[in-house]
């Protein structure tokens, strides 16, 4: 799906105090950005920001970074923060393929919410739970590796379970119908809200290594 360009998005993102522009220079020292050494949680594909903004609001003692490669999408998250102060939240406008160049043994928890399923076999390496991406994540986790994934795509979910367990991750929590399970702590993304209203099943898995 081709995204529409948003006029002025690049400029607004560049001027936002919530965006880390020189992220490669901060690799290995993000505690200086937040001015503390609190746990750091990362969301890849943060979209319009609902999930990560709500998490940052509810958990002021956890630092959050959202990565989004499309400026036309990230600008919508930035707009939500007008007249809002969240010192524990930052964004990075970059492709996740470069994740190992952005962080160095700093991440405590990684969120993968409704990632692109890349259904064709020749695109397997682009899936965020592919062995290629799992290898990239190895260098970004602080000590223990902790991934939480949600998706409405059954094929991607089944693929991810196999890929994660084949690469040494152990399943801590698993839901084959998250909303039916009525997880009161679940924070929905914009995508999740839209498709759950249409009756789509939401799958969730939490793994550790």
Image (tube, rainbow, N blue to C red):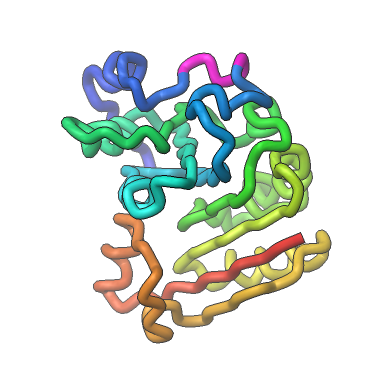
In this orientation, which residue lies closer to the viewer: 74 or 18? 18
In this orientation, which residue lies closer to the viewer: 10 or 59? 59
Q: Is residue 183 left or right of residue 8?
A: right
The reply to whether the magenta stretch includes residue 23 is yes
Q: Is residue 43 left or right of residue 19?
A: right
- The residue sitting at 48% across, 46% down in the picture is 62
Residue 78 picture location, percent across and down: 28, 32
Total marks drawn?
Answer: 0
The reply to whether the magenta stretch includes residue 81 is no
Residue 5 picture location, percent across and down: 28, 27
Q: Is residue 190 left or right of residue 105?
A: left
**133 is higher (above) or lower (below) than 148:** above
Can residue 121 be seen here? no
Q: Quadrant of residue 179?
A: bottom left
Q: Which residues are magenta?
A: 21-25
Q: Quadrant of residue 157?
A: bottom right
- The residue sitting at 26% across, 36% down in the picture is 76
Residue 178 picture location, percent across and down: 44, 77
Residue 121 picture location, percent across and down: 68, 55
Can residue 195 be seen here? yes
**94 is higher (above) or lower (below) than 186:** above
**189 is higher (above) or lower (below) than 198:** above
Q: Is residue 96 left or right of residue 79?
A: right
- The residue sitting at 50% across, 64% down in the picture is 150
- The residue sitting at 45% across, 81% down in the picture is 177
Q: Quadrant of the N terminus?
A: top left
Give the main secondary structure of the magenta stretch.
helix
In this orientation, which residue lies closer to the viewer: 196 or 38? 38
Q: Quadrant of the C terminus?
A: bottom right
**23 is higher (above) or lower (below) than 110:** above
């Amino acid at each position: 799906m081709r995204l529409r360009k948003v006029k002025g998005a690049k400029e607004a993102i560049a001027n936002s105090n919530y965006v880390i522009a020189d992220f490669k220079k901060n690799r290995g020292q993000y505690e200086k950005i937040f001015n503390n050494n609190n746990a750091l949680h990362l969301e890849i594909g943060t979209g319009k920001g609902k999930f990560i903004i709500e998490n940052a609001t509810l958990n002021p003692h956890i630092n959050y970074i959202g990565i989004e490669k499309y400026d036309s999408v990230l600008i919508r998250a930035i707009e939500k923060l007008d007249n809002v102060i969240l010192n524990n939240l930052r964004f990075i406008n970059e492709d996740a393929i470069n994740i190992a160049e952005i962080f160095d043994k700093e991440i405590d928890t990684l969120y993968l919410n409704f990632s692109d399923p890349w259904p064709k076999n020749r695109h397997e390496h682009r899936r965020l739970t592919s062995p290629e991406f799992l290898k990239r994540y190895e260098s970004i986790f602080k000590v223990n590796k902790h991934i939480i994934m949600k998706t409405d795509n059954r094929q991607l979910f089944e693929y991810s379970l196999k890929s994660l367990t084949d690469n040494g991750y152990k399943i801590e929590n698993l839901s084959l119908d998250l909303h039916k399970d009525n997880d009161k702590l679940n924070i929905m993304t914009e995508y999740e809200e839209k498709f759950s209203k249409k009756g789509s099943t939401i799958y969730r898995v939490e793994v550790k290594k």
